[in-house]
Image (cartoon, rainbow, N blue to C red):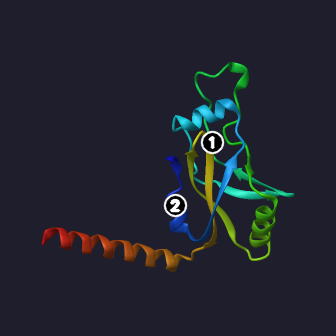
Amino acid sequence: MKTLATNRRASFDYELMERYEAGLELTGAEVKSVKTGHLSLKGSYVTAHGDELFLTNSLIPPYPHAHKETKHEDTRSRKLLLRRSEIRSLIGKSRIQGLTLVPVRVYTKNRLVKLEFAVGKGKRQIDKRDTIKKREARKDIGRAMKAR
């Protein structure tokens, strides 16, 4: 499994609970572009439209060597491939419980492009400060251990 892109802000802005894996419905030129590392999950999120889930606002620039007629829109919504029962439970969690579906990383599994996303609850400002304090404490401990 090769990781192609990660959303580093996801764990900072959200308290991530359950993680899910879904396939991405991409065109051929998009797959080529993603596999060469041209993908950004910054500011992207998972939305529900009817009985389907979509990855919204992720940036996949056009593949430069693709045919001119196969150019795609950079930030179009891309369908997620999941089982119907999983989709229903995720829609229920996002609508009823007020949780957010946050993309965490995109990777390849065999020849397929997969998206890992998590059910998350938004952090308040004070929670973010706590996260920063803990991270700084871990760094200080690491430096002290290295110095010994």
What amino acid type is highlighted by mark number 2? Arg
Rendered residue at 68%/49% (across/down): 23
Rendered residue at 33%/72% (across/down): 136
**Whether residue 59 is visible:** no
Label 1 – label 2 distance at C-alpha: 25 Å
Q: Does 121 appear above or below 65?
A: below
Direction front: furthest residue = 110
| Residue 143 image label | none
Q: Does 131 appear above or below 50?
A: below
Rendered residue at 60%/28% (across/down): 63
| Residue 9 image label | 2
Q: Nearer the viewer, mark 1 or mark 2?
A: 1
Q: Is residue 32 left or right of residue 137?
A: right
Of mark 1 and mark 2, the one earlier in the sequence is 2
The answer to which quarter of the image holds residue 142 is bottom left
Residue 69: x %, y % from top left: 73, 21
Residue 121: x %, y % from top left: 63, 73
Q: Is residue 11 left or right of residue 133?
A: right
Answer few, some or many: residues within 10 Å of disc 1's Cα (few below 14, many 20 plus, some between 14 and 19): few
Residue that label 1 marks? 112
Q: Is residue 6 left or right of residue 82?
A: left
- Helix, strand or loop under label 1: strand
Disc 1 and disc 2 in contact, CB within 8 angstroms: no
Q: Give the camera-side residue of 88 and 143.
A: 88
Residue 14: x %, y % from top left: 57, 69
- Helix, strand or loop under label 2: loop
Residue 145: x %, y % from top left: 19, 72
